[in-house]
Image (spheres, helix red, strand yellow):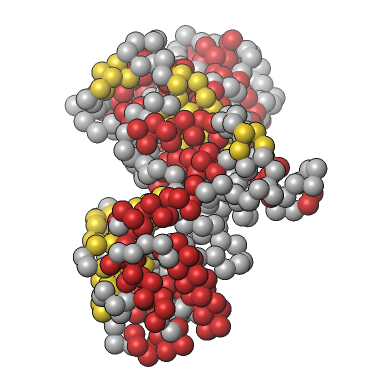
């Protein structure tokens, strides 16, 4: 289904003019070798351009449509009309002149074979160049040319003849297309294509997928068989999963297009997440990006919330210049590097409305009153996952396995992984910080994964002063006792939270008698109405408790305790802000 969905997307993009036809692809090209009509190299032109990346300017290659490059392993295989200096000039920065000469010889044979029947100035100039050029004295001939070091480092080159790029010549284009479309050797056994269902000669090696961090820079394979243990019935390489040349080109082109799209791709740990609508309309990707990141340019949190609610209810929504149909087919693919191949973390397909419905459910379950530092009330996924990471560690990425499982849970509406909750608890105990993000994780996990309805009563957005669930009330009481201490000792360096929070959360019966004794000492330092106010708060909470404190709280109830503490503390800050206003 993955390859079929990508192929259908490729065809939608071709109809819109966003992708090239089979046999051609966009490649980053840095320099052009200008030839005269006699095949002499007369000039080297830089095709690089300056762009702004963030706040900085950067010099980058130009994207050009050229004959599709081959997939290289350890062998020598030349590309047509666009390649690096090793193949087109027979030189490079590596100390292997013999191999560079062999690479040039391979390029010469390919170009002479494809151009031999063409008699026009462009083709004749190219043929003359390959006949004349000698790699053994190339370094001496090019020593005064600009950009030589960069060229020898491996950047892509093209040919420029009479102010026209060679790949733009119509006769040369036809020659390449005919060669690309040519039927493979009759010795190859025909099979049924797994994507199209047609009888085809299978493509042995599929084009590479590029741009996945951690994978091979030259590209990795989504489908490959490179060891006998993976093969069956004597078939080699991708003949074990027969896919025709067109289908192989189509699905890899679509995937490369998605991965190269910086606006819509997402990185979570080592996983690259790409998503698309079957009809190829970018509005669906724009909307999904904004809803996942909780960040819409010119849209408020209320606007995003309303859009999610309406789409999840099946309402067609106006979006930018078009509309979003909740019934449109939508796909999400998560891939990660794995040596020379790519691992599929997950592949999800459903209607756009259903996908947004799952996002909306997640957004509502993690919704909790934000802390004083936060202006937005919506929490993006990257920020949520960051809360599970030790900020002092060198590697500040969340566990890849946990990230994948969390993404799957969010996008399918399934149960959150236990590791998400456990990591949040680990950071709370280690850092002694009860943050908005960590409490959002605790609340969402207990709402979706918890079984006890009485626990869910306490999992509200703001303080719930009606519930009598003991861990929640104890958390509230701890927050009040901390407030009493801070009011009695302004500027205190270490509060009861620093000393007792973890133990109070796990073993209330051991800690709370001590805390209440400390409270009596602290409250005596207060005067007037503030003293009465805190005494009443403590008294009201004590009335909600049973006679005996729990000896131990489960990991689940510890989360409830933390939510109670957080709610009570944010309520206190809310009142303080109202008084200041």
Q: Where is residue 50 in the image (x, y as percent from the top left)?
A: 23, 61
Q: Residue at x 41, y 15 (%)?
A: 327
Which quarter of the figure has residue 323? top left
Tell me if 110 is positioned left or right of 579 in this view.
Answer: right
Residue 398 is at least partly visible in this image: no
Q: In this view, does 107 lie above or below 90?
A: above
Q: Where is residue 180 in the image (x, y as percent from the top left)?
A: 48, 51
Q: Which residue is drawn at 39% across and 10% down?
A: 314
Residue 131 is at least partly visible in this image: yes
Which quarter of the figure has residue 408? top right
Q: Is residue 300 above or below residue 187?
A: above
The residue furthest left is: 581
Q: Where is residue 209 in the image (x, y as percent from the top left)?
A: 51, 49
Looking at the picture, tell me which residue is in the foreground, 566 or 234. Answer: 234
Looking at the picture, tell me which residue is in the foreground, 133 or 377. Answer: 133
Q: Position of residue 551 (x, y in %)?
A: 70, 25
**Where does the N terminus fall, quadrant-wise?**
top right
**Where does the C terminus fall, quadrant-wise?**
top left
Q: Which residue is drawn at 39% across and 26% down?
A: 279
Tell me if 319 is positioned left or right of 15 in this view.
Answer: left
Tally the numbered discs.
0
Tell me if 564 is positioned left or right of 581 in this view.
Answer: right
Which quarter of the figure has residue 430? top right
Q: Is residue 189 above or below residue 326?
A: below
Q: Is residue 154 above or below residue 501?
A: below
């Amino acid at each position: 289904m993955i390859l079929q969905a990508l192929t259908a997307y490729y065809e939608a993009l071709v109809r819109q003019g966003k992708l090239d036809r089979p046999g051609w692809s966009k490649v980053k090209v840095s320099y052009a070798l200008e030839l005269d009509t006699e095949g002499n190299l007369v000039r080297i032109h830089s095709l690089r351009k300056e762009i702004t990346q963030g706040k900085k300017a950067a010099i980058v290659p130009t994207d050009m449509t050229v004959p599709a490059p081959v997939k290289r392993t350890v062998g020598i295989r030349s590309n047509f009309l666009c390649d690096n200096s090793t193949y087109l000039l027979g030189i490079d920065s590596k100390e292997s002149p013999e191999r560079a000469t062999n690479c040039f010889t391979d390029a010469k044979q390919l170009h002479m074979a494809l151009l031999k029947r063409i008699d026009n100035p462009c083709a004749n100039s190219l043929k003359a160049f390959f006949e004349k050029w000698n790699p053994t004295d190339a370094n001496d001939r090019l020593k005064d040319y600009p950009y030589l070091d960069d060229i020898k480092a491996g950047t892509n080159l093209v040919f420029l003849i009479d102010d026209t790029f060679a790949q733009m010549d119509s006769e040369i284009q036809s020659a390449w297309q005919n060669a690309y479309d040519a039927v493979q050797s009759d010795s190859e056994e025909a099979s049924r294509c797994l994507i199209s269902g047609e009888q085809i000669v299978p493509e042995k090696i599929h084009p590479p997928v590029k741009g996945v961090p951690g994978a091979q820079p030259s590209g990795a394979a989504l489908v490959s068989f490179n060891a006998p243990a993976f093969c069956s019935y004597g078939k080699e390489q991708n003949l074990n999963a027969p896919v025709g040349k067109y289908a192989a080109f189509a699905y890899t082109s679509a995937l490369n297009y998605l991965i190269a799209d910086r606006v819509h791709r997402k990185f979570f740990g080592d996983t690259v997440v790409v998503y698309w609508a079957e009809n190829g309309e970018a509005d669906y990707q724009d909307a999904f990006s904004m809803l996942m990141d909780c960040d819409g340019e010119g849209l408020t949190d209320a606007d995003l919330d309303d859009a999610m609610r309406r789409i999840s209810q099946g309402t067609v929504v106006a979006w930018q210049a078009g509309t979003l149909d909740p019934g449109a087919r939508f796909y999400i693919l998560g891939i990660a590097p794995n040596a020379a191949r790519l691992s599929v973390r997950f592949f999800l397909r459903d209607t756009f409305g259903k996908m947004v419905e799952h996002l909306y459910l997640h957004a509502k379950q993690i919704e909790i009153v934000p802390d004083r530092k936060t202006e937005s009330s919506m929490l993006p996924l990257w920020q949520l996952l960051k809360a599970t990471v030790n900020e002092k560690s060198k590697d500040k990425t969340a566990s890849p396995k946990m990230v994948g499982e969390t993404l799957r849970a969010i996008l399918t509406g399934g149960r959150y992984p236990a590791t998400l909750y456990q990591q949040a608890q680990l950071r709370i105990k280690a850092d002694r910080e009860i943050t908005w993000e960590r409490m959002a994780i605790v609340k969402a996990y207990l709402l979706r994964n918890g079984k006890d309805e009485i626990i869910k009563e306490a999992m509200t957005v703001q303080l719930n002063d009606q519930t009598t669930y003991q861990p929640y009330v104890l958390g509230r009481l701890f927050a009040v006792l901390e407030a009493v201490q801070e009011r009695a000792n302004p500027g205190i360096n270490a509060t009861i939270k620093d000393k007792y929070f973890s133990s109070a959360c796990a073993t209330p019966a051991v800690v709370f008698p001590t805390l209440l004794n400390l409270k009596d000492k602290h409250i005596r330092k207060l005067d007037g109405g503030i003293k009465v106010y805190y005494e009443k708060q403590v008294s009201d909470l004590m009335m909600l408790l049973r006679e005996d404190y729990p000896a131990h709280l489960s990991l689940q109830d510890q989360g409830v305790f933390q939510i109670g503490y957080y709610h009570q503390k944010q309520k206190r800050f809310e009142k303080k802000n109202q008084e200041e206003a």
